[in-house]
C-alpha cells in the first residue's frame, strides 16, 4: 500500500479503488481498512466512486505513534486533510464508523470546503464535555484491564445474532495502546462532537442500529444540524449495522447520489 508521511512524521497506509467522486472510508477504534472490502462496501461503491481505503494511525499497516498528543481527534482529522492533499483532491465525501464519527465531524467543522458529504455509522446523542471526559477517564483503566474483549462483549450484548468471530479477530488484532492513547486524548481536548454538530454544513446521513440507540437520541443530533437525516436499522446493534452492509447500502448509495 502507498504511504503518506504526515506533517508530524507518521507514515499512514492508504489505497484507492474505483473511479468517480472520492469517498474516504475511515474506521473507528478497531480493525483495518480491508474491512470495507470484506463487508461489500467497496464492491458497491467503486463502480461510481473512488473509494479511499485508509488505515488511520495505530491501525493496519500504518505507524503506531505513542502518546495522547499523537492520537487526538484533531490530529486524526488533520491526517485526512493531508491525505486529500496527497491525492490531489480538493474535497471528498467521508464515511466514518464508530469513533470515526468524531473525526468526520471535526473534519467537516474545521475544513468545510474539503467535505462534500458525510455518512456516519453510529449514534450521536447529546453529551457535554464534562460527561465525555469523565467517560473516557473511567473507560481507560477498564480497557487496559479487559483489553478488546471488554468492547467485544459489550457489542455482543447488543445483537440478537452475535457478530462473526472473524470480526472479533479483526478487532483483537488492532493495537490496543492506540485506543488507550485516544481515550486519554479526550481528557485533554475540550470539545465533544455534540457541540460541533450545528456547525457541520455538509449533507449528513447517520446510520444507526436500533439496539445501540434504543431511545433514538440520534434524532436530537439530526435536529440541531443544518442538513442531516438518519437511517435507523431495525433489529441490530452497533456492529451489525455496519458489517451487515446489505441492510444499509441502498440507503447510503441513494444519499450519496443525491448529495454529490
Image (cartoon, rainbow, N blue to C red):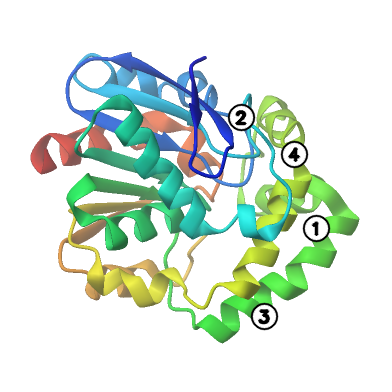
Question: Which residue in the protein does label 3 denote?
Answer: 134
- Circle 1: is it few (<14), some (14-19), or many (20+) Cα within 10 Å? some
Camera-side mark, 2 or 1 = 2
Question: Which residue in the protein does label 4 denote?
Answer: 175
Question: Which residue in the protein does label 1 denote?
Answer: 143
Q: Secondary structure at mark 1?
A: helix
The mark found on residue 231 in the picture is none
- Dots 3 and 4: beta carbons under 8 Å? no
Closer to the camera in the image, 197 or 39: 197
Question: Quick check: 157 left or right of 91?
Answer: right
Q: Is residue 12 above or below residue 176?
A: above
Q: Earlier in the sequence, mark 4 or mark 2?
A: 2
x and y percentages locating residue 74 in the rendered image = 47, 59
**Residue at image x 72%, y 55%?**
67
Camera-side mark, 4 or 2 = 2
- Dots 3 and 2: beta carbons under 8 Å? no
Q: Is residue 82 above or below residue 173?
A: below
Amino acid at each position: 500500500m502507498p504511504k503518506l508521511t504526515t506533517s508530524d512524521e507518521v507514515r499512514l497506509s492508504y489505497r484507492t479503488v474505483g473511479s468517480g467522486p472520492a469517498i474516504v472510508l475511515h474506521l473507528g477504534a478497531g480493525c483495518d481498512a480491508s474491512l470495507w472490502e470484506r463487508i461489500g462496501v467497496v464492491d458497491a461503491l467503486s463502480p461510481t466512486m473512488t473509494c479511499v481505503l485508509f488505515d488511520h494511525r495505530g491501525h493496519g499497516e500504518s505507524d503506531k505513534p505513542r502518546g495522547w498528543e499523537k492520537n487526538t481527534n484533531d490530529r486524526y482529522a488533520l491526517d485526512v486533510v493531508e491525505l486529500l492533499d496527497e491525492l490531489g483532491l480538493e474535497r471528498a465525501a467521508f464515511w466514518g464508523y464508530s469513533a470515526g464519527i468524531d473525526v468526520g465531524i471535526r473534519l467537516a467543522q474545521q475544513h468545510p470546503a474539503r467535505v462534500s458529504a458525510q455518512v456516519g455509522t453510529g449514534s450521536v446523542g447529546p453529551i457535554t464535555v464534562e460527561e465525555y471526559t469523565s467517560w473516557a477517564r473511567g473507560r481507560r483503566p477498564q480497557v487496559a484491564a479487559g483489553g478488546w474483549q471488554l468492547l467485544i462483549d459489550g457489542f455482543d450484548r447488543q445483537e440478537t445474532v452475535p457478530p462473526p468471530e472473524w470480526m472479533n479477530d479483526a478487532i483483537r488484532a488492532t493495537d490496543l495502546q492506540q485506543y488507550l492513547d485516544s481515550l486519554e486524548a479526550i481528557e485533554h481536548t475540550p470539545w465533544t462532537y455534540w457541540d460541533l454538530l450545528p456547525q457541520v454544513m455538509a449533507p449528513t446521513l447517520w446510520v444507526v442500529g436500533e439496539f445501540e440507540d434504543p431511545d433514538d437520541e440520534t434524532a436530537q443530533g439530526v435536529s440541531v444540524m443544518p442538513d442531516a437525516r438518519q437511517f435507523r436499522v431495525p433489529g441490530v446493534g452497533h456492529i451489525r449495522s455496519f458489517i451487515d452492509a446489505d441492510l444499509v447500502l441502498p440507503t447510503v448509495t441513494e444519499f450519496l447520489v443525491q448529495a454529490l
